[in-house]
Amino acid sequence: MASTIDLRRAGDRFHTRTDWLDSRHSFSFSRHWDPANTHFGLLLVSNDDTVAPGTGFDTHPHRDMEIITWVLDGALVHQDSEGHSGIVYPGLAQRMSAGTGILHSEKNDSWTLDGSPEHREPVRFVQMWTVPDAAGTVPGYQQLDINDQLARGGWTTLASGMPKHSAQRAIGIRQRHAALHVARVRPGETLELATAPFVHLYVARGEVSVEGAGLLGEGDAARITGAEGQRVTAGPEGAEVLQWEMDAAVTVG
């Protein structure tokens, strides 16, 4: 089957705007509903959120979901009902497995750490959800700083449940058919995407040229079915990109 590329532009995504949150959703989410846009492969949620200082998501529940958070700017304070807590910052891979049920909060409380004015800034992060292999597992949490790996260039496997990535992945997810890779691509540098039934590429910063699809800017995404290792080249300012590699899809109906 020939590879197909479905481009999704930043300006066409669902948009939630409140006095403390600016969120753009790649798929149906909350009050935004489109039955033709509920997922791609195993990816159900990909939200690009900006949260104002001193605010955030109050304690709320999740169940049977693998949730990965990737911070682009600022710092996000995580606390959950299993006793996990941490400050998530750029270059820190974080995963929460909701399992049988978990409560957590996510706050832009970084400005309270030392009270200095420079910490009074928004936090921007991409949060992604994928279904787990099995429902009803014990909730879990994992985080790891991967800035050193990112600095070496190329793709870094941020999180994976695929056996083939077990040796080089930063953190694990409970989904054996999915992996998330991240790269900070230097100006003009070219990388190859995975060869997989489903690849979701999200441009978090900058711009890239995708073989067979053309130019993608910040906030744009490419949904590639039957991906064949297409080349991705960063623009003159470089780019930061997130790539989901998936060899299965959510079963609908």
Image (spheres, helix red, strand yellow):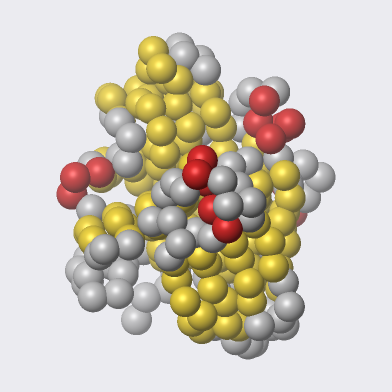
Q: Seen from this angle, which residue lies furthest right?
A: 167
* Left or right of residue 14, residue 95 in this image: right
Q: Position of residue 151 (x, y in %)?
A: 67, 25
Q: Position of residue 33 (x, y in %)?
A: 22, 72
* Left or right of residue 85, residue 125 in this image: left
| Residue under the image location 38 percent in, 56 percent down | 52
Q: Position of residue 195 (x, y in %)?
A: 53, 38
Instruction: Give the vertical position of 237 relative to 13 (above or below).
Output: above
* Left or right of residue 197, residue 140 in this image: right
Q: Is residue 224 visible?
A: no
| Residue under the image location 22 percent in, 70 percent down | 32
| Residue under the image location 63 percent in, 41 percent down | 91
Q: Quadrant of residue 217?
A: top left
Relative depth, front residue between 183 and 192: 183
Q: Is residue 6 visible?
A: yes
* Left or right of residue 44, residue 195 in this image: right
Instruction: Give the vertical position of 155 relative to 35 (above or below).
Output: above
Q: Quadrant of the N terminus?
A: top left
